[in-house]
Image: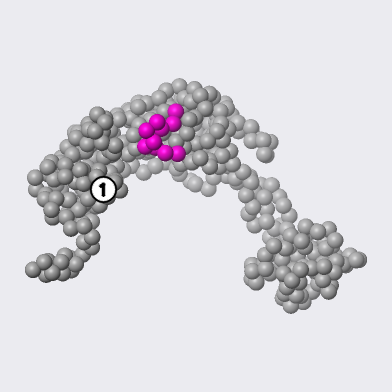
Amino acid sequence: MLNDKQKKFVETAYKEFGTDTISRKQVVEIETKYNLTGNSWLVNNSDYKVGRGLYKLPVDGEVNSTPAPVVKQNLPKNQVAQEHVTLQSTASTADNLVPVKESTFVSFGNYKDIKNIIKSKIFYPTFITGLSGNGKTLNIIQSCAELKRELVRVNVTVETDEDDLLGGFRLVDGATVWHDGPVIDAMKRGAVLLLDEIDLASNKIMCLQPILEGNGVFLKKIGKFVEPSVGFNIVATANTKGKGSDDGRFIGTNILNEAFLERFPVTFEQEYPSIKIETKILNNVMDMFSLKDEKFCENLVKWADVIRKTFYDGGVDEIIATRRLVHIINAYAIFKNKLKAVQVCVNRFDDDTKNSFLDLYSKVDAGVNIEDLNPGDTNDDEVIMEDEVDQ
């Protein structure tokens, strides 16, 4: 016997199509149009199947005791094809994966070495580690941009697995289609594969072992062996060295398998840029907004440098990254207020840290007054109203 939901589906199908035999496509149409989902009881039951992709609707809630004759439906060829489960392989649809050059970029640190590795087209897996926001990823992207090399970037998480990396089956218009993953795509193109935040990965990343050895990989799901094209290389970035985060600053990072880490012959330790380079970066960002305030940029870099030295000495638990200095310039372009730009960009820290950072900046930049900040101000009208109340 059918339950109420199943009976509702049958009644709706009779009214919609005026026949007791429907196709798989018509089942989907009913489900979509009337939100009557969950009809595997019909399409997966041989008692109802009367032909390829055709099903006999039950009468009075009972299973049909005798099969009905096959009803030939004159469906367009493309619709008929959707009734079959086929295996296809899709190629990448992207024409060009070469990154765009950034006008604000300034090379520093390991940039030259990374560029030489990529330029050589020698397979040489490279591991880059360093604190957050110090240009690890940007150096790789801009190296590829300068060399006009294609780049495939994968942002790794603890959920990243073989299906995400190498590829898997997807259902497209009723057909089972194989989609190459980003790793396979990069191998076929001879592109640079960027594994960003690799230390967030679980042991599922071990599917890359043969690829990290410079060999091809056998895609067991489709029985196909893929060899890397000339120029293919792998660069991984991480905030740790794959040994986890002892101080808890980078929560979620994992201890990576030693055999996996051994596949990277070289490791670069990325530091923050020098005062001179960092000042140039901020001035470039200023130029992008048609602004010019070299003194502001100098003060920001000086302020960040003091905080970093204090951090390395164990005096504070937080640090100002180059990325956050760029955020401050962006905020300044919006609010046109130096101290407010600094404030909104350090609000992410706890109150004690935030206040100490703001106080330090007011000492570095003699042109600002910490007392000018009014917490909670959202517009000029509110400031005027508060002044009137004070009077």
> Residue 28: x and y, percent?
68, 64
Q: Is residue 249 magenta?
A: yes
Q: Is 304 drawn above or below residue 367 in the view shown?
A: above
Identify which amino acid the numbered label 1 is placed on: Asp
Frontmost residue, 96 versus 113: 113
What is the magenta segment's predominant secondary structure? loop
Task: Give the residue number, with chain letter if any, for mark 1.
Answer: 351
Which quadrant holds the C terminus?
Answer: bottom left
**Image position, residue 340 (x, y; %):** 20, 53
Residue 375 as seen in the image, left or right of residue 90: left
Residue at horizontal 34%, vertical 34%?
Answer: 131
Residue 82 on image: x %, y % = 70, 58
Q: Position of residue 162 (x, y in %)?
A: 58, 38
Label 1 packing within 10 angstroms: few (<14), some (14-19), many (20+)? few
**Res 73 quadrant in image:** bottom right
Q: Quadrant of the N terminus?
A: bottom right
Q: Is 299 left or right of 251, judged from the image as shown?
A: left
Q: Residue at x 22, y 36 (%)?
A: 307
What colour scheme was applied to this rendering of the protein? one colour
Q: Is residue 109 visible?
A: yes
Image quadrant assignment for residue 44: bottom right
Residue range highlighted in magenta = 243-252
The answer to which quarter of the image holds residue 378 is bottom left
**What's the residue at 18%, 39% (across, down)?**
303
Residue beneath the point at 82% across and 71% down: 61
As drawn, is 385 to the left or to the right of 198? left
- In this rendering, position of residue 56 left or right of residue 139: right
Furthest residue in direction right, as rendered? 66
Reply yes or no: does residue 229 show up in magenta. no
